[in-house]
Structure formats: C-alpha cells, structure tokens
Image (cartoon, helix red, strand yellow):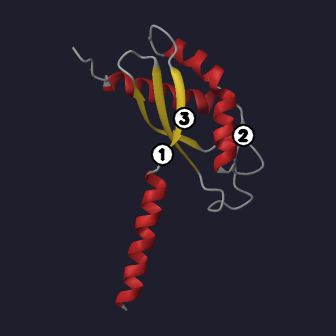
Amino acid sequence: MVRKRNPRIDSLVRSALADIIETEISDPRLAFVTITEVEVTPDHDVAIIYYTSLDPTVVSGNAPSRGDRVADADEVAAGLESALPRLRALLVRRVDLRSAPDLRFRRDPTVEHSARIESLLRGLDRDGD
C-alpha cells in the first residue's frame, strides 16, 4: 500500500520553519525570506522547502532590515544552508515528528514565472498600441 503525503504535516512544518527563521535565526541574509510551501515525504525523512526572498533591486538601500542590505539569491541560499543544523534541531522540537527530516531548500519559481508572464503581457500591450 502506497502512503500519501499528509498536508497537515506539510502545513505544520511550513509554519514552524517560517516562525523559526523569523524569531530564532539572526542571520541577516535571511531577513526577508518567506517559506511558501513544504512537501514532507510520507516517511518524514525528507522535507522539501520552497522559499522566496525579496529582490534586492526592488528595495532602496535604506530599507529597514536585520542587516545593512537585502541579500541576493546566492547569499540567501548560503544563509539557509548555514542555518540548516539549527533549523532541523528547532523543527523537531516544535513539530511532533519521529525524527528530524532532511531539509532541502528550493527557490520557489512562482515569482520568476509571474514576472516573466507580466513582462510578456506588457510586451503585448505595447504591440497593440
């Protein structure tokens, strides 16, 4: 019998990780990270975490943050990898799982896809004038 993923566990892990990053991790590279979705395998061995971060080109240099500036995508990825052991330890305390899952971070492609679609639509609008 094939076990299916449990959306309740996905939601609990997403919520816990978002809170941990906001309140427990002081790395300025993670100041504007948002956890968008989590997929935990049925055996709870692996959690794929999708995240987005603020585009540094959108924010002015004097925006309030936990650091001097907004981190770029590579810095955010490095910050998440650096925080990985602590994230796992804090996660297993907050969510009742048999063991801490292996956390795998992936940039959520939705933002880039949305920007691409918006760009294409703007191009169509200019062509129609």
Q: Are marks 1 and 3 in contact (CB under 8 Å)?
A: no
Which numbered disc, 3 or 2, marks the residue closer to the eye?
3
- Image quarter (top left, top right, bottom left or bottom right) of the N terminus: top left
Q: Point out residue 92 in the picture as x, y percentages from the top left corner.
A: 52, 14
Look at the image and tell me whether residue 25 can be seen: no
Estimate the spatial distance between the alpha carbons at disc 2 and disc 1, rounded to whole Å: 20 Å
Mark 1 highlights which residue? 108
Q: Report crowding for label 2: few under 14, some 14 to 19, many 20 or more residues within 10 A (C-alpha).
A: some
Marker disc for residue 28 = 2
User: Compared to 37, does 73 lie above or below?
Assistant: below
Give the SS element for disc 1.
Answer: loop
Estimate the spatial distance between the alpha carbons at disc 3 and disc 2, rounded to whole Å: 18 Å
Mark 3 highlights which residue? 105
Kindly indicate the quadrant of the structure image that contains residue 12.
top left
Left or right of 63? Residue 55 is left
Tell me the amino acid under the disc marked 1. Answer: Asp
Mark 3 or 2, nearer chain start: 2
